[in-house]
Image (cartoon, rainbow, N blue to C red):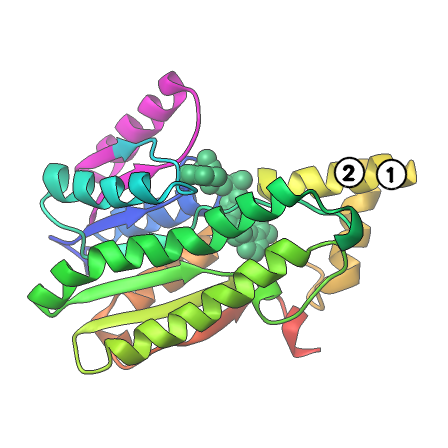
Amino acid sequence: MNTLKNKVALVTGSTSGIGLGIARCLAEAGTDVMLNGFGDARSVESQRAELAAEFGCRVAYSAANMANAAEVRELIAQCTRELGQVDILVNNAGIQFTSPIDEFPDEKWDAIIATNLSSNFHSIKAVLPQMKERNWGRIVNIASAHALVASVTKSAYAAAKHGVIGLTKVVALETARTGVTCNAICPGMILTPLVQKQIDDWAERDGISKERAQELMIAEKIPTGQFQTAAQIGALVVFLCSEAAGQVRGAAMPVDGGWTVQ
Ligand code: NAD
């Protein structure tokens, strides 16, 4: 508890799903938190206030669009202005779209590359100078099992997530002689709105119930037969932010129920 007291964490895409789970785990470990993501103003404000009240920390929010480089840079600047600094950067914002490549809309490709990959480049570039100056920083990129293996219909997503691993390794080498670490986590399947939409699409396409589509989706990929949870990802983020993880550099850590060892 409170192992990360006096640190400031910025979690992109933290109004839902995995990002929100990570923000909760970091707040529980003692950080102040900058939330980011889309959502209607009233529910985002109640999420922000609840987190602050539950963990007794400062919580700020920005609606910056991570697909826009200037807004990503402004997000880092806003966090620094409002919370004093950025010690921990978690690049989590991400989107999905599935289609065979010969029918894949160009604008969906561009949106996925911008949101899931280029945003990580822009945020890391903007935050590194202050982390190097303090000689302490933690960068955690939320990649995917699709950073390590492929699936049909996910050309843009798999390309972006494989790219995140390459970026992670380069940043880890460029910061190797500093107190800044950069690592990636590769979740398998977590029941968030992003995955629920794929289950719903599968059920509709094959004319089966959503429960059956969910069973088939897990059976196809996950040896444990279970979803992973946002809290499990958040716990690994907290570990990667600890002093004990100071020599973990450029790793791509699967949390995927065995998906990628097959
Ligand atoms: P989600 O849809 O529940 O949440 C995505 C979050 O990102 C939301 O807060 C949303 O508002 C935000 N977001 C989306 N586009 C944005 C943009 N342009 N600018 C700012 N914020 C934006 O999704 P999730 O399942 O929690 O996914 C989070 C991350 O985890 C993604 O990078 C995803 O690729 C990755 N991931 C998810 C799974 C899974 O099974 N759910 C598996 C592997 C990897």
Q: Nearer the viewer, residue 60 or 118?
A: 118
Q: Is residue 256 inside the magenta stretch?
A: no
Which residue of the protein is positioned furthest toward the top in this rendering?
42
In x, y percent, where is residue 176? 24, 81
Would you place residue 240 above or below residue 68 in this image? below
At x 81%, y 42%, the residue is: 202
The quarter in which the C terminus is drawn is bottom right
* Amino acid type assigned to the residue bearing label 2 in the image: Asp
Say whether residue 229 is visible: no
In x, y percent, where is residue 111? 54, 43
Q: Nearer the viewer, residue 126 or 60?
A: 126
In x, y percent, where is residue 78? 18, 38
Q: Categorize mark 1 by other alpha carbons within 10 Å: few (<14), some (14-19), many (20+).
A: few
The quarter in which the N terminus is drawn is bottom left
**Whole-Å distance between the Cαs marked 1 and 2?**
6 Å
Magenta residues, as a range? 31-60
At x 46%, y 56%, the residue is: 117
In the image, is the residue at mark 2 within 8 Å of ligand 1 by its beta carbon?
A: no
Tags 1 and 2 touching, CB below 8 Å: yes
Q: Is residue 102 left or right of residue 73?
A: right
* Amino acid type assigned to the residue bearing label 1 in the image: Arg
Residue corresponding to mark 1: 205
- Under circle 2, the secondary element is helix
Residue corresponding to mark 2: 201
Q: Is residue 42 inside the magenta stretch?
A: yes
